[in-house]
Image (cartoon, rainbow, N blue to C red):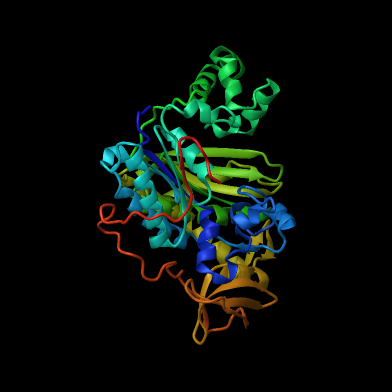
Amino acid sequence: MRAAPTILHLDMDAFYASAEQAAKPSLRGKPVVVGGLGPRGVVATASYEARRFGVHSAMPMAQARRLAPNAAYLVPRFLLYRTVSDQVMELLGRLSPLMEPLSLDEAFVDLEAGGTADDTASALEIGEQLRTAIKAVTGLTGSVGLAGSKMLAKIASEEAKPNGLLLIEPGTERELLAPMSVRILPGVGPATADHLRRAGMTTVNDLVEAGEAELVRLLGKAHGGSLHRMAFGYDDRPVVAERDAKSVSVEDTFDADLHDRVRVRTEVERLADRCVQRLRGAGRSGRTVVLKVRRYDFSTLTRSETLRGPTDDPAVVREAAARLLEAVDTTGGVRLLGVGVTGLADYTQDDLFAQAAGEQAATGEAAEEETAAAGDGDKLVDGTREETQETAEQLAARRWPAGHDVRHDTYGHGWVQGSGVGRVTVRFEEPESAPGRVRTFRIDDPVLQPADPLPLVRNPVDYSSWPASLPNSLSGPVSSGGESRP
């Protein structure tokens, strides 16, 4: 625990939804929900306008649509989010060499290690400057928490939302935490909170009064002892510049259960390729391939295979995942599939490439025979021919996801509002334009093409010499000494 509030936590405000509103002038000030749009989709982020209707992250998309039927529902654009995240993380990295990203929109910074703050006044100053810089560079807002520990800095940023700054003076932690819900503490989820509630503990002060012995009796030695220390505001975890990833994985939930064994294997192979792309993007390789299968009855099976050495070869991962699938009964239907790689390393094992080639050669003839027998657009299932060609609606949804960018030879840049009945509806506007007009095209119109996202700020301010040259300016609420601002 530090004597000065020199640990900073930044959390961007409703990040995905705010980025979509910044990119689409017609959506500003309106409810926006980003996530999977299928029947089993889940909300990734909801704008503050949508949250007024009760929509929140991790909510089933079907429930969100019932609560806010007039909101804009968009498919995530991770290319845009990663670009903005890189801009934010670059600014944070200027403050200190000890910068710990937690996700695309959240990070800790040790200001003391960077020499940018050593007391309350300098910490407040740098927090204000950071928010101003983020707004100027990205067009978005973020909330900043400052405290003497990571736990309290994160709590402070949450209390400061949206677009605020809260500083917790060391020594005031007990007073600030006492009336708060136990859910504010790390590691207290719904189940633990309910267990504590049944024991008569709903606030942090209740945990303090209960004492360590009672918490250990209720939750066990490790969890109970840790929770008791956190209730007193104690957290000595350091900011870690590089967090070593333990695994890389991808998974998909399907709108309808998959019953066709050939389709299940195809999806597993596709997930394996995506997993390897992420693996290579991180410059890593892995030794253990993991398959996750959630069946029609919500039972989840996990199977793994450890290879002779680390690999980043997609053929090796595909074949390993396929072998694991053979040991799983998918007769009743599959609602989710996932492929992951663990045991990460910074090198690959050369002989695994020969292993993949041998396995492919052994199965090559059988695959060719099956393809020839099934023909274009068909496949064989239990000796019968089954049509697999996607419907026009599925093709439109796959090529024209709601919210994604397009470009038209005549009308310029726009985004997809929706598609169906062989048509795609597009609103033509740019981040710095006025709300644009809506036009409808055939889904196969040759002059309408998918496009990359445009920058949210066309000519961002140059902060290459920041923080020294950034003027002292402020664009939102600031508080300190334990007082929070919504």
Q: Would you say 188 lies left or right of 345 here?
A: right
- Residue at the image position 67 percent from the left and 71 percent from the top: 393
Q: Nearer the viewer, residue 469 or 406?
A: 469
- Residue at the image position 61 percent from the left and 22 percent from the top: 206
In the rendered image, is residue 309 in sight?
no
Residue 470 x, y percent position in the rendering: 30, 56
Q: Would you say 215 lies left or right of 141 here?
A: right
Residue 377 x, y percent position in the rendering: 61, 70
- Residue at the image position 56 percent from the left and 27 percent from the top: 178
Query: In this view, which residue lies farthest toward the right?
Result: 66
Query: In this view, which residue lies farthest toward the top?
Result: 213
Tell me if residue 325 comes above or below residue 4 in the rendering.
below
Query: In this view, which residue lies farthest toward the bottom?
Result: 410
- Residue at the image position 47 percent from the left and 28 percent from the top: 173
Q: Nearer the viewer, residue 102 or 291?
A: 102
Q: Nearer the viewer, residue 124 or 430?
A: 124
Tell me if residue 271 comes above or below residue 114 in the rendering.
below
Residue 25 x, y percent position in the rendering: 54, 70
